[in-house]
Amino acid sequence: MRRSCVFVAAVLAPVLALAGRPALADEAYIEGTGGVSWTSEETDAIAGLAMGYDVDLDETFFVGVEGTAEKLLTGGTRVAWGIGGRVGAEVLPRSKIFTGVNWQSKDCRECGNAVGLGVGWEQNLSEKIYAKLEFKHLFVENGEPDANVGIVGLGMMF
């Protein structure tokens, strides 16, 4: 657990250090997500919310911080809360790729916390609306099997 917190803190430190610099076209966002989570033992549907803030480093690259609430749509689970950071680039007009890391709380009493590593693609559908595809691999603590998550999201920037 201690290593997970140190790892997430090390990733978020540059994001927080950049928060006080002059903005280019920084943006906040909120999105609804849905998808599937799978381990070597089972597969379940997942739904959630994410909100965050991206800071432009220049006209192409950005860093951001993100909070999540995700729930496996199966009995005996609870909302897993997460906090993390991401780094990305605008690769085509109105399109971003990114990679991220996050810490996530337990989704059941017996479960372990997790650290997730992910990659994704965001495509602007309009000036304020975007769609997202993301894959995350969750490294779960307490000897439990790691999990994979495939997510589709629809969000709004403001």
Image (cartoon, rainbow, N blue to C red):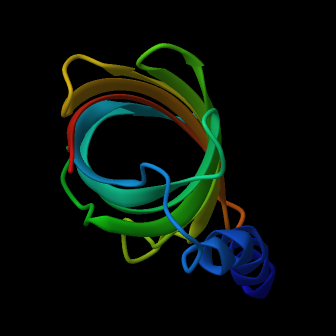
- Picture layout, residue 65 above or below residue 19: above
Q: Nearer the viewer, residue 108 or 115?
A: 115
Q: Horizontally, is 110 left or right of 113 in the view?
A: left
Q: Position of residue 61 (x, y in %)?
A: 66, 40
State the count of labels: 0
Residue under the point 63% across and 69% down: 15
- Picture layout, residue 86 above or below residue 7: above
Q: Residue furthest top?
A: 92
Q: Horizontally, is 22 left or right of 13 in the view?
A: left
Q: Residue furthest bottom?
A: 2
- Picture layout, residue 42 above or below residue 16: above
Q: Nearer the viewer, residue 152 or 142?
A: 152
Residue under the point 69% across and 82% down: 5
- Corner quadrant of residue 82: bottom left
Q: Position of residue 122 (x, y in %)?
A: 42, 25
Q: Nearer the viewer, residue 48 or 79?
A: 48
Q: Quadrant of the N terminus?
A: bottom right
Would residue 138 be visible to someone looking at this image? no
Q: Nearer the viewer, residue 94 or 49?
A: 94
Q: Position of residue 139 (x, y in %)?
A: 69, 54
Residue under the point 19% across and 20% down: 126
Residue under the point 57% across and 38% down: 136
Q: Position of residue 68 (x, y in %)?
A: 35, 60
Would residue 135 be visible to someone looking at this image? yes
Q: Horizontally, is 23 left or right of 91 in the view?
A: left
